[in-house]
Amino acid sequence: MLPQQTKFGFSQHFPNVPRKPEIVIATGQLVGEGTDIVHFDVLFLVYPFSSAIKLKQYIGRLQRGSQQPCMVYDYHDQWIGFFEQMFKKRKAVYKKHFGVNVDIK
């Protein structure tokens, strides 16, 4: 759970950031709850997690208010079994909830 002051919105938490930031680097905790940025176009997932709820919430942030296609870059480490297992769970969420087959490059 986030501290109460972070739930008032991005602009109050980061008053010096322009209204429409071009790049936001944040933890999933900050972007996942109480963020009032109109939309994101691209999401980089660079830490391991397996929660379907979190993944749907993050992708929902991309889709909210966006008129253009959104892109998700989901990095995973195939050489560490635990990270690979979490990625496989996310991959199943992409297919089940978004109709997307993940292309690994």
Image (cartoon, grey):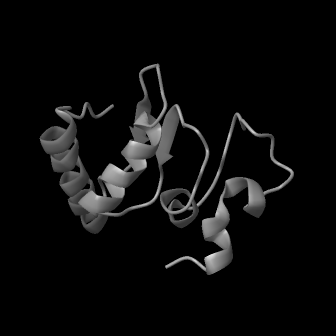
**Quadrant, the C terminus:** top left
Asked whether residue 16 appears in the rendered view, the answer is yes
Residue in view at x 65 percent, y 59 percent: 9
Comparing 100 with 83, the one in front is 100
Asked whether residue 77 appears in the rendered view, the answer is no
Residue in view at x 47 percent, y 20 percent: 67
State the residue lying farthest toward the front.
8
Is residue 45 toward the left or the right of residue 92 in the image? right
Snapshot quadrant of residue 73: top left
Image position of 95 with respect to 57: above or below: above
State the residue lying farthest toward the right.
16
* Total marks in image: 0
Residue 59 image position (x, y, % from top left): 38, 44
Snapshot quadrant of residue 104: top left
Residue 90 image position (x, y, % from top left): 25, 52
Residue in view at x 61 percent, y 80 percent: 3
Comparing 82 with 3, the one in front is 3
State the residue lying farthest toward the top.
68
Image position of 13 with respect to 16: above or below: below
Image position of 27 with respect to 73: above or below: below
Image position of 102 with respect to 86: above or below: above
Is residue 20 toward the left or the right of residue 102 in the image? right
Residue in view at x 24 percent, y 64 percent: 81
Residue 60 image position (x, y, % from top left): 38, 44
Is residue 93 toward the left or the right of residue 10 in the image? left
Residue 28 image position (x, y, % from top left): 50, 61
Comparing 79 with 13, the one in front is 13
